[in-house]
Image (cartoon, helix red, strand yellow):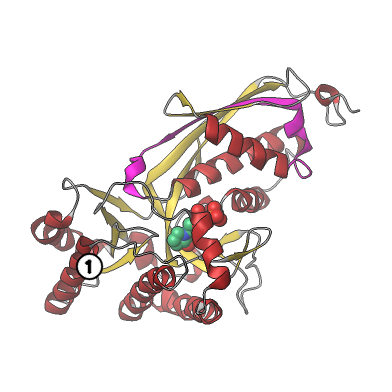
Amino acid sequence: MTDRKHNIFGVIPTDKVGWRSPSNIALVKYWGKKSGQIPANASLSLSLKESVSETIITFSPAKEKDFKIDFYLDNEIQEQFSKKIKTYLESILHSMPFIAQLDFKIESKNTFPHSAGIASSASGMSAIALCLCDIERKYFDKDSSDEKFFQRASYFARLGSGSAARSIYGGISLWGEVEGIRSSSNKFAINIDKDSDDIYKSFHDSILIVDSSEKKVSSSLGHSLMTNNTYATNRFLQANENIKTILKILKTGDLKSFINIVESEALTLHSMMMTSNPYFILMKPNTISIIEKIWEFRKETDVPVCFTLDAGPNVHILYPDPFEQKVKSFIESELLKFTYNNVVIHDNVGNGPEKIV
Ligand code: 2P0
């Protein structure tokens, strides 16, 4: 049997790496997947600025034959997460064999409350993947280009959590094969800022917390329910059409068409949950009240503001920077009453992950 401390790669000393990585909000949704974390349709998202995970991995030569993971969230050991991450690391051992010769202490913090329904798996898994790729680059692949580094990080982030593949870049990310976009892939996301109008990089995302209780439907259950959903095949066709259309819209800065696709995607995601079996309504009455108020406000003022939803009741309100004051006053005066404890998280589109250690 190979001695894991002295494998073909040589010995890695005690050291640490750390990355700050954002959550993202999907405009065209990923909901449904094939085996091997291959998405049933392409998806597209905006990476956030303030809603991030900060993860530091301290590693040292493994003390025993089986490598060890201790995962801490906000300085508290998390046994369940530690097990999940161990399983994840075992699943990628064939690509990153050095993992087996190390013990890992992973310390992670999120800048957003757990209850916010912001995708912590996207920020958390992307930060871990970036740290792993950083260890790999430091000890085995010093000359790797940034492009290759981030592509590999997106690949490994995807294997941890699909939406995490998109968090590897700032601005706008596209994950999934799209006809006519040669660099697009089901295995990693790409950044598409250079093909998009600058207005989208100025977007704000004000997240209205309607309900702070635990998620009713886990992502894995949600994805799996698409396997037997009668409408799934058409949904996947629609999503791939929506991707092609939104890519054109992003080039031109046509906000009216942008709003149409983004809101339709959010409602379709929720329709998929209503038409699955078991079925779920993940919106709350206040979610609908907020949506109706946004529609009224948009009609009266012509301000290009719209909503999107994750797989839960909280509402993401999206708007370009020039309308910040108008929309924030509207939220303050008309929408706060529909939130839980007046909680709104004001975020905007960010520049992507940063190395912190
Ligand atoms: C998305 N969501 O595109 C969609 C919209 C939630 C609603 O991707 O099983 O946590 O880890 O690959 O990425 C949530 O699913 O699922 C998600 P896994 P993930 O952002």
x, y percent for residue 304: 24, 72
Q: Horizontally, is 94 left or right of 49 in the view? A: right
Q: Nearer the viewer, residue 21 or 164?
A: 164
Amino acid identity at mark 1: Ile
Q: Horizontally, is 98 left or right of 225 in the view? A: right
At x 41%, y 43%, the residue is 52
x, y percent for residue 9: 83, 31
Residue 191 in view in this figure: no
Vertical relation: 8 (above or below) 180:
above
Location of residue 35 (image quadrant): bottom right
Residue 126 in view in this figure: yes
Q: Horizontally, is 239 left or right of 249 in the view? A: right
**Residue 93 on the magenta segment:** yes
Vertical relation: 256 (above or below) 26:
below
Question: Which residues fall within the magenta stretch?
Answer: 92-117
Which residue lies under the disc numbered 1?
288
x, y percent for residue 212: 28, 47
Extreme residue toward the top, this view: 63
Label 1 element class? helix
Q: How crowded is mark 1: few (under 14 residues within 10 Å), some or many (20 or more)?
A: some
